[in-house]
């Protein structure tokens, strides 16, 4: 009798009890099965040193055809010399020779690292959830109490700035809004805000916080009782530290936060890095750019915050009318987010990107 051999293995950090990126194990099976030959999967998201990175690579079977590395943002070049030492270590490692290496990230762009090594977009958190409210229940009726919602747990700089500007314009109580208090408030821009301590005393602002870790949109008023969801992504182009002048560092990332307005049949309004709107459009989503100023996607964070506050200031009735004028786009986004079309397109894009550069040993 022929022995069954599993062509796809997973090793290392992702298998530990504290593995942070279990969704990667849920969403890459179709990608694995679209590749020719055997694969080995490792996750390096929380790996913060070259020696630990090499240890993970040691666990890969040198005989597999393809190594799949999952890493939410992948590794940035070193600030001192501009070299990406992780990529250098990867290409030089003995177990990584004579095979394809695909690095899956939650970023927007694809790029080639070596003759047979590619960094590609494959947003696991975006693809991982299939739990959602039926369409007829998700579509909003006329007369909701709130026009806007925005849930924010970690007080990143861009979220703090949004909350403060809404507070400053007496709009905070017009939004289903939450913001935590456990984080850094030392960024230079925060130090320049008048009467900031008065706003900080309001924190934490909680709205059903026990449900914030739920990657679905069920049973939360932020998704059922507002027409527009202001999505504050995990990072924007505003750096979190206090380095003077360092406030336009790009941090592309797309997480589960960005698909929630699609699943909940809401108008999406994204506070994210530059290119976020373009990326979602490339996947087929309707991002309703007629809501935001021309060129919004390429604006720096501070200007996006000002634009969002201006939109909120137009009132509940404004966004209610906008909602019903765009119901077709809202239903389109729901259908796309609840199907497999996006996943299939991402896989096709990865295979096409790989094939554009001939593999050489």
Image (tube, helix red, strand yellow):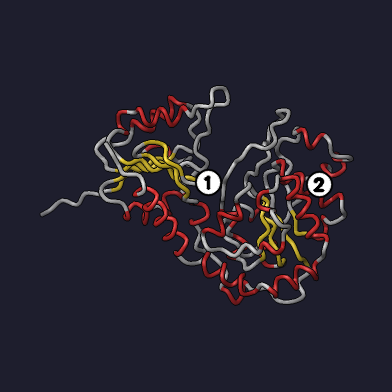
Q: Position of residue 208 (x, y in %)?
A: 70, 57
x and y percentages locating residue 324 in the rendered image: 70, 75
In what quadrant of the picture does the C terminus appear?
top left
Mark 2 residue crowding within 10 angstroms, few (<14) / some (14–19) / many (20+): many
The image quadrant where one finds the N terminus is bottom left
Q: Kindly report the distance in space between the C-alpha atoms of the residues bearing marks 1 and 2.
A: 28 Å
Q: Which residue bears the numbered disc 2? A: 164
Q: Name the residue located 65 percent from the left edge and 41 percent from the top edge.
A: 237
Which type of secondary structure does the marked residue at label 1 adopt?
loop
For the residue pair 297 and 122, the one nearer the viewer reads as 297
The residue that appears at 49% across and 63% down in the rendered structure is 130
The furthest residue to the left: 1
Could you say where residue 121 lies in the image, as x and y percent from the top left?
Answer: 47, 48
Point out residue 306 in the picture as x, y percentages from the top left corner. 78, 51
The answer to which image quadrant residue 13 occupies is top left
Residue drawn at x 81%, y 57% as measured from the top left: 310
Q: Earlier in the sequence, mark 1 or mark 2?
A: 1
> What residue is disc 1 on?
107
Label drawn at residue 45: none
Q: Is 42 left or right of 48, judged from the image as shown?
A: left
Secondary structure of residue under mark 2: helix
Q: Is residue 73 above or below residue 233?
A: above
Residue contact at pointers 1 and 2, CB within 8 angstroms: no
When the figure is inspected, residue 27 is found, relative to residue 329, above or below; the finding is above
């Amino acid at each position: 009798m022929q022995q069954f051999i599993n062509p796809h293995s997973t090793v290392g950090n992702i298998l530990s009890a504290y593995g942070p990126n279990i969704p990667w194990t849920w969403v890459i099976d179709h990608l694995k099965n679209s590749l020719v030959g055997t694969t080995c999967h490792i996750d390096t998201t929380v790996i913060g040193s070259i020696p630990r990175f090499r240890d993970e690579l040691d666990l890969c079977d040198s005989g597999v055809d393809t190594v799949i590395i999952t890493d939410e943002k992948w590794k940035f070049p070193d600030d001192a010399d501009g070299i990406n030492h992780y990529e250098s270590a990867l290409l030089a490692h003995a177990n990584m020779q004579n095979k394809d290496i695909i690095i899956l990230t939650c970023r927007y762009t694809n790029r080639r690292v070596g003759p047979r090594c590619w960094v590609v977009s494959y947003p696991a958190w975006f693809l991982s959830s299939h739990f959602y409210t039926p369409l007829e229940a998700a579509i909003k009726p006329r007369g909701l109490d709130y026009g806007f919602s925005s849930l924010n747990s970690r007080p990143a700089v861009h979220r703090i700035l949004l909350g403060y500007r809404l507070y400053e314009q007496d709009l905070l109580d017009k939004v289903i809004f939450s913001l935590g208090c456990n984080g850094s408030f030392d960024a230079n821009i925060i130090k320049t805000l008048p009467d900031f301590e008065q706003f900080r005393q309001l924190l934490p602002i909680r709205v059903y916080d026990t449900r914030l870790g739920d990657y679905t949109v069920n049973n939360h008023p932020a998704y059922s009782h507002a027409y527009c969801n202001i999505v504050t992504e995990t990072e924007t182009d505003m750096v979190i530290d206090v380095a003077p002048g360092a406030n336009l560092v790009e941090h592309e990332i797309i997480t589960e936060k960005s698909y929630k307005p699609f699943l909940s049949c809401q108008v999406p309004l994204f506070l994210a890095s530059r290119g976020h709107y373009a990326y979602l459009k490339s996947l087929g989503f309707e991002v309703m750019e007629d809501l935001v100023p021309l060129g919004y996607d390429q604006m720096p964070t501070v200007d996006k915050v000002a634009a969002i506050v201006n939109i909120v200031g137009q009132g509940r009735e404004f966004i209610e009318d906008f909602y019903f004028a765009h119901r077709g786009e809202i239903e389109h986004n729901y259908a796309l987010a609840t199907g497999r079309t996006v996943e299939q397109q991402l896989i096709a894009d990865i295979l096409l990107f790989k094939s554009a550069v001939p593999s050489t040993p």
